[in-house]
Image (cartoon, rainbow, N blue to C red):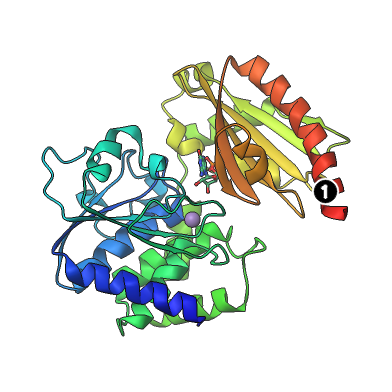
């Protein structure tokens, strides 16, 4: 372990030991790593003998409801300031906790930021940011080891889920020997790979699959099929009992096209904004493109929100993406 990492983990541990009452939070529209890290962090802080409550602005997506203690996660901010410290996990920017929680977090005297995103404003009083970690859950495994905490089945399940989903089931370029070492340890500690995979990947409703079919019908290819795009409109959602939350993994279907170096899914959010989700392969850095529009994320998975109607935003953004992939390629060569 690098000296800096050891130092950061020590800072986190001593900060947790200093306080008694914690809130743990993650980003809006939580994914598997966000939910896994939220649940895991709560278990770790509780193991240290502290009082801790977990919060997310958006509800837990159905495929992660099997995680331990998710029923206890609160979706409303606390009425009064009853917490001495807040721990934010997997939350690239402070604003990503969601507008409903921002005031409560800002009013908390001490902030601990634990994250692996590419760009992270150091908003915490303690910032432990590892951009080379596959997932926040990988970092929390290291935290457990530093605490000599052998994860039980519940904690192993939460950590496994975050690593599984943030590595795209061990398919993305953040999958390495260290990931498999940790995964092997987590299975030995009680995580059940088949049960977790079945909950995460094979728990769709018929309506979700119908919605996916409609989204795939809008698929278009650009720049000699190097870019693939699709859209999810409000009207598709209003015709379906499915929600935005259930569309979380749709972009992975676009990403599976062999020729596509970049996949883009445009989702109409209902507040006049279009959520633009991006995934890339190879050298293309979609986080930089997202940042141009006030968003962010990782090199190969990023998003931003753009004001406007779906059709206009889609054609404007595709034009920008087409010139971006060429420009980005050139800047890599120079
Ligand atoms: P998604 O396409 O799943 O909405 O987001 C892809 C990735 O980008 C996720 O890792 C997510 O956390 C990150 N992301 C999405 N929106 C933003 C944003 O507004 N700011 C930052 N910093 N990251 C974002
Ligand atoms: Mn993550």
In percent of width and height, residue 84 lies at 16, 55
In percent of width and height, residue 17 lies at 20, 72
Picture quadrant where residue 213 is located: top right
Q: Is residue 52 above or below residue 266?
A: below
- At horizontal 30% and vertical 44% (from top left) the residue drawn is 56
Looking at the image, residue 105 sits to the left or right of residue 128; the answer is: left
Looking at the image, residue 325 sits to the left or right of residue 274; the answer is: right
In front of the other: 184 or 284: 284
User: Which residue in the structure is indicated by mark 1?
Assistant: 331
Label 1 neighbour load within 10 Å: few <14, some 14-19, many 20+? few
Q: Residue lying furthest bottom in this view?
A: 148
Q: Is residue 31 above or below residue 151?
A: above
- Total numbered circles: 1
- At horizontal 59% and vertical 57% (from top left) the residue drawn is 168
Q: Determine if residue 101 is in view.
A: no
In front of the other: 334 or 175: 334
Under tag 1, what secondary structure? helix
- At horizontal 55% and vertical 65% (from top left) the residue drawn is 134
């Amino acid at each position: 372990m690098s000296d800096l990492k050891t130092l950061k983990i020590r800072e986190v541990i001593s900060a947790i030991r200093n306080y008694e009452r914690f809130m743990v939070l993650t980003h809006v529209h939580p994914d598997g790593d966000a939910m896994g890290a939220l649940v895991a962090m709560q278990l770790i802080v509780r193991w240290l003998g502290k009082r801790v409550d977990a919060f997310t602005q958006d509800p837990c997506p159905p495929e992660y409801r099997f995680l331990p203690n998710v029923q206890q996660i609160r979706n409303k901010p606390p009425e009064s300031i009853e917490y001495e410290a807040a721990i934010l996990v997997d939350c690239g920017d402070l604003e990503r906790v969601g507008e409903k929680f921002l005031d409560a977090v800002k009013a908390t005297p001490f902030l601990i930021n634990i994250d692996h995103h590419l760009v992270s404003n150091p908003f915490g009083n303690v910032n432990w940011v590892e951009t080379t970690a596959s997932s926040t859950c990988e970092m929390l495994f290291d935290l457990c080891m530093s605490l000599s905490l052998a994860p039980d089945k519940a904690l192993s399940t939460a950590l496994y889920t975050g690593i599984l989903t943030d590595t795209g089931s061990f398919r993305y370029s953040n999958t390495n020997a260290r990931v498999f070492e940790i995964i092997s340890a987590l299975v030995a500690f009680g995580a059940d790979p088949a049960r977790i995979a079945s909950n995460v990947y094979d728990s769709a409703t018929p309506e979700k699959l119908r919605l996916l079919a409609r989204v795939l019908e809008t698929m278009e290819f650009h720049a000699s099929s190097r870019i693939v795009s699709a859209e999810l409109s409000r009207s598709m959602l209003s015709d379906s009992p499915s929600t935005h939350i259930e569309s979380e993994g749709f972009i992975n279907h676009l990403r599976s096209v062999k020729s596509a170096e970049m996949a883009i899914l445009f989702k109409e959010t209902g507040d006049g904004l279009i959520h633009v989700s991006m995934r890339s392969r190879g050298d293309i850095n979609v986080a930089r493109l997202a940042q141009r529009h006030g968003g962010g994320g990782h090199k190969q998975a990023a998003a931003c929100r753009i004001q406007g109607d779906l059709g206009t935003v889609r054609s404007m953004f595709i034009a920008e993406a087409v010139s971006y992939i060429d420009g980005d390629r050139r800047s890599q060569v120079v």
